[in-house]
Amino acid sequence: MKKIWKTVIASAVWGTIFSTTAFAGQWVGGQKGWWYDNGDGTYPSNTWQWIDGNGDSISECYYFDASGYCMMNGTTPDGYEVDQSGAWVLNGAIQTKTTPMSQETSVSVNDDTKWKLIRVASLVYDSYNHSYPFKTAAFPLNTRLSDLTLSQKAYVLYGYQYNCQDFRFVDSFAYGYDCHVIKDYDLKAVITEFFGSASQADIDALISKSYILKQSNGNYYFNAAGDFGDAGSFHLDGSQMSFSMENGRLKATGNVVEYGSSTSSYLPVRKFTAYYTPYGGFSLGGYRFDQLVVE
């Protein structure tokens, strides 16, 4: 079997086909047969999957049983024939599907926007470090905006107002603390720019985490202090990023670095790719976070 870079999942009804992306997926063999590792912690089961094994934009289709093993040389439960390699055949001919080529062009991003983009991606990554048992080493991840919990969203917003200059957050000293004051409608605008909509639940999450110290007369007082000054044992490095537009999304690629005690410096240990969708808001220079992949 061959290493896989892109797949398209198909249902048993061949007219209903939709695309998904696999990040560095691969075939895995064992005593019971072959199964397919999507590269993001999942594997296909009870389904068909189109697989472009050699990156030539031509995919073959394979059926995976309830245990996730590829069926070979027989008839699938829904009545289709597969050959000795597991590929779907019709009248003896292997069936193929053209996989669209990725459209990607290099772009330049100004320094201010670049800084905000990497900070938000780093906050998303770190939100998993805070949401689950503390991780002391860089870890793989594949997450979308829709995967973030209210608590994680609150963490990202808190880190944003702490790290990134936004004219809607005004420096102040109130209630014995350094604060960033923002009006109610401006806070809702920022939340909408980040997540597509703003609800009371989003604001309640900020309050419950004590990121908002006080609500008074239509203003919210954010804690302007936090633990964002220390880079920590690992982080997304923004110094060597490259940017491109890929199929309508802004794509940022770079390294996850980790502190090496033997060298007393940060060394690259993983690769990351962050995706952003164009959006007319101010917060991230006209973009909205969409996906983060750490391999």
Image (tube, rainbow, N blue to C red):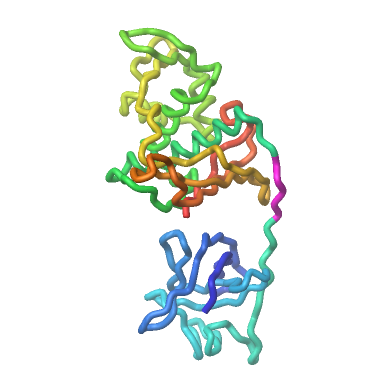
* Closest to the observer, 200 or 253: 253
* x 39%, y 15%: residue: 221
Which percent across, then down, holds residue 272? Answer: 51, 49
The secondary structure that most of the magenta stretch takes on is strand
* x 43%, y 72%: residue: 45
* Closest to the observer, 216 or 33: 33
Residue 254 seen: yes
Residue 11 seen: no
Which percent across, then down, holds residue 263? Answer: 39, 44
* Closest to the observer, 18 or 168: 168
Which percent across, then down, holds residue 209? Answer: 32, 28
Magenta span includes 271: no
Which percent across, then down, holds residue 248? Answer: 67, 47
Please determine whether, in this image, residue 124 is positioned above or below residue 60: above
* x 53%, y 71%: residue: 3
* Closest to the observer, 266 or 33: 266
Please determine whether, in this image, residue 124 is positioned above or below residue 102: above
How many labels were placed on the picture?
0
Residue bounds of the magenta highlight: 103-107
* Residue 14 occupies quadrant: bottom right
* x 52%, y 79%: residue: 1
Q: Is 178 positioned to the left or the right of 87 in the image? A: left
* Residue 262 occupies quadrant: top left
